[in-house]
Image: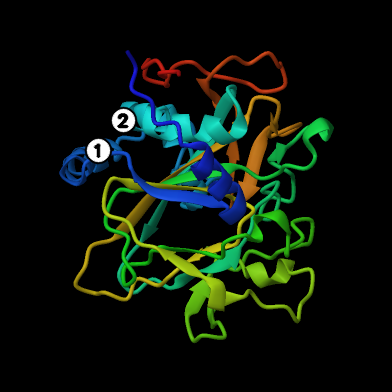
Amino acid sequence: MQQTFTPTPEEVARFHELGYLGPFKVYEEEEMRRLWRRERLRLMDRSGAVYDEGDAQAGNTNIANYDRHLDSTFLADHICRPEIVDRVTAVLGPNVLCWRSEFFPKYPGDEGTDWHQADTFAFASGKPQIVWPESEKDFGGTITVWTAFTEAAEDTGCLQFIPGTQRTMYYDESKEMHYQPDKINQQDKEGVTRGFYGYDYRQLQKDPDWSPPQERAVSMVMRPGEAVMFWSTMMHASKPHSAPDKEMRLGFAGRYVPTSVAVYPDTDEVDEYGGRVSLSEYGTVLVAGTDTYDHNRRVTRTTKGHEFPKR
């Protein structure tokens, strides 16, 4: 009999109220440390990666960190783990796709990440990357499950959330945001230096005089192997890595939507963070249920032949 990790109705209600659930355990701490020692070496082999880091169009940008679950056996299994999928389906319903994964490294001395929200993920590329159907227009964004592969502490750059902000968008993703890789990052009203991977997210504010209610922020301190699930439309950020004697903080995020959501509609490439990659080898992954739609390309195996598990 399969073990289930479905949250209680009270936990689901709390998720809808706050915008996040967790932290919760996906791996034992020592197991996570052992796995990451092994996998970080394996991931240096990009021979099966769907985006070529050395491509002249892609360059050495954040895009190279996208979707390694499409070639890595470990990450393919990770995005499908029942500890994650059972919680996601409790909110999104039985039929769910993983449409993206990303690494989020933060090294000693790195600044914090700007407060931001993501609905269609059009803020960098200029094109909506996910579009919910009209029949579900009250929803938007994606559910992100962010797993700490290393310690995420107050001084190593843990995530920060402003609970309850997922129902109101304070940013307009259709506004133009300029990529400035050499941009000098600025301090927020609490004196924290923040940036957004070469962008100034404040350029998207609907009201330029508004500022995030940071006094309501909560910190997501996590041990290796723990994860947190949250709506991408909830305001979130991260603290700086201010501990020179500690290791890199590394988070790995899987992003999930119902099968009814259109992923990369009418798009053959992703153009953001100063780079461009082709979607010719990309596909969504069905992690639970069935997909009765035909608007998303889908893959059932990694580029190295490993079959994705499914709930």
Q: Is residue 53 left or right of residue 148?
A: right
- Residue 48 is situated, as x and y percent measured from the top left of the image, at 39, 27
Packing grade of label 1 (10 A; few <14, some 14-19, many >=20) is some
| Element under disc 2 | helix
Q: Which residue is mark 1?
A: 39
Q: Amino acid at mark 1?
A: Glu
Residue 229 drawn at (x, y percent):
48, 46
- Residue 303 position, x and y percent, is 42, 21
Nearest the viewer among 115 and 247 is 115
Q: Is residue 192 left or right of residue 43?
A: right
Q: Which residue is mark 2?
A: 74
Can residue 278 be seen at all in this image of the molecule? yes
Q: Is 260 placed above or below 116 here?
A: above
Image vertical order of residue 3 relative to residue 234, above or below: above
> Three-letter amino acid code at disc 2?
Phe
Q: Position of residue 99 (x, y in %)?
A: 56, 33
Q: Please count the marks in the image.
A: 2
Q: From the image, which quarter does the N terminus lie in?
A: top left
Relative side of 291 to 173, left or right: left
110 up-or-down from 136: above or below: below
Q: How far apart, in angstroms, are the residues tagged by discs 1 and 2?
A: 7 Å
Residue found at x 66% / y 48%: 121
Instruction: Specify whether residue 198 is in view.
Output: no
Rendered image: mark on residue 92: none
Q: Name the residue at 43% across, 73% down.
A: 111
Where, by quadrant of the figure, is residue 292 drawn? top right
State which tag comes first along the sequence, 1 or 2: 1
Q: Quadrant of residue 123?
A: bottom right
Q: Residue at x 66, y 45 (%)?
A: 141
Q: Residue furthest front?
A: 10
Mark 1 in CB contact with mark 2 (< 8 angstroms)? yes
Residue located 79% across and 74% down the image: 207
